[in-house]
């Protein structure tokens, strides 16, 4: 009888690499998560536990819904509102760092209610920079819509821009719907924007926020109160070294080439060169309505047309405010005209 030796070999396979979330990185400041594909971007939207981490784009991303794996979104891609039955943002806001790194996200298409944009809501500590939103199509029926951010709560947006179209109801902007205590700097929009109230080429409404070295060139149309080429309504905030060149049309009160309504805030070294048309009261080349605020070193050269009272080349209606070293050279057409045609000291 022959005795054989049977060897049993157990093979244990080890993965060659550890599982990598996104296209690389760890989410830390010195090794941000890398966003290279549409899948990466949508994965970020689906992992709110990562909303406080660091991200960097390493490639352009096309979200065209006609491409494989893409879609028409019904809410923001990142930090969306998860319950449309309440008036507040129900969900986790984005509070991390997102560096576009000079890249673009194109053809974002959203048909939804409110808090719409690439980001539905930014929280304190959020920092978005160096990002281009191109050929977006955002269609909302409610509040807070922008190509980049629906609602910015104390976040920072630096060196970013948008092109395409944005529509909605209230607080609708080409880049940001509402800027609440937030900062927007060195950014611009060429978007066509339309809505009802608080509609602006860059920002729908800015509440105690700052807008510095920004501009808008798109067409802005609003049917309600507060329509502006750059900002629809500015309350308690500062607008510095910014301008608008796009046309502005409003059918209610407070329509302005740069800002529709400005209360408790300041406008410094800013201008409008686009045409302004309003059928309600308080229509102005730079600002439609100004209350307890200041304008300094600013001007308008655009044509202003109004059919109601309070139509002005620089400001349509002024109450308890100061205007210094500012002027308008634009033609003013209206039934009752207050024309600021010369520099004011």
Image: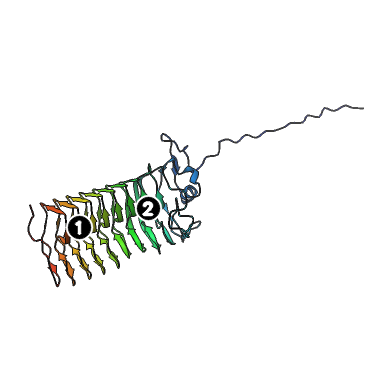
Q: Is residue 16 left or right of residue 344?
A: right
Mark before the other along the chain sequence, 1 or 2: 2
Q: Judge by depth and name the residue closer to the eye, 192 or 211.
A: 211
The residue wearing badge 1 is 290
Q: Judge by depth and name the residue closer to the eye, 235 or 204.
A: 235
Residue at the right extreme, as displayed: 1
Q: Residues within 10 Å of mark 2 (few under 14, many from 20)?
A: many
Residue 191, horizontal then vertical, whole percent:
31, 59
> Which residue corresponds to the image point at 8% horizontal and 61% vertical from the top-left?
341
Is the N terminus in the top left, top right, bottom left or bottom right quadrant?
top right
Q: Quadrant of residue 339?
A: bottom left
> Which residue corresponds to the image point at 26% horizontal and 68% vertical from the top-left?
252
> Which residue corresponds to the image point at 20% horizontal and 57% vertical from the top-left?
290
Q: Judge by depth and name the residue closer to the eye, 70 or 168.
A: 168
Q: Secondary structure at mark 2?
A: strand
The residue wearing badge 2 is 151
């Amino acid at each position: 009888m022959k005795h054989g030796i049977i060897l049993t070999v157990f093979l244990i396979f080890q993965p060659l690499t550890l599982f990598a979330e996104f296209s690389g990185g760890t989410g830390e400041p010195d090794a941000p998560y890398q966003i290279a594909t549409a899948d990466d971007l949508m994965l970020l939207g689906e992992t709110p536990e990562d909303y406080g981490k660091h991200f960097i784009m390493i490639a352009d991303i096309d979200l065209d819904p006609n491409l494989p794996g893409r879609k028409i979104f019904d809410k923001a891609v990142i930090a969306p509102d998860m319950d449309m039955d309440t008036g507040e943002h129900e969900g986790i806001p984005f509070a991390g760092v997102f560096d576009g790194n000079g890249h673009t996200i194109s053809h974002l298409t959203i048909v939804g209610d409110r808090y719409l944009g690439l980001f539905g809501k930014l929280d304190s500590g959020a920092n978005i920079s160096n990002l281009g939103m191109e050929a977006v199509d955002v269609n909302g029926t409610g509040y807070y819509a922008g190509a980049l951010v629906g609602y910015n709560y104390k976040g920072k947006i630096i060196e970013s821009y948008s092109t395409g179209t944005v529509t909605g109801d209230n607080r609708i902007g080409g880049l940001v719907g509402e800027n609440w205590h937030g900062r927007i700097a060195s950014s611009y929009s060429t978007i066509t924007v339309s809505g009802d109230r608080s509609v602006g080429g860059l920002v729908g409404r800015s509440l105690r926020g700052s807008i510095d070295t920004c501009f808008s060139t798109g067409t802005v149309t609003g049917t309600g109160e507060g329509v502006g080429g750059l900002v629809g309504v500015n309350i308690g905030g500062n607008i510095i070294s910014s301008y608008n060149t796009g046309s502005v049309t409003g059918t209610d009160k407070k329509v302005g080439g740069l800002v529709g309504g400005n209360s408790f805030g300041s406008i410094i070294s800013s201008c409008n060169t686009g045409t302004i048309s309003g059928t309600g009261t308080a229509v102005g080349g730079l600002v439609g309505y100004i209350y307890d605020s200041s304008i300094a070193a600013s001007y308008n050269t655009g044509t202003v047309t109004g059919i109601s009272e309070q139509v002005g080349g620089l400001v349509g209606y002024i109450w308890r405010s100061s205007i210094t070293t500012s002027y308008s050279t634009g033609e003013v057409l209206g039934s009752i005209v207050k024309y600021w045609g010369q520099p004011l000291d």
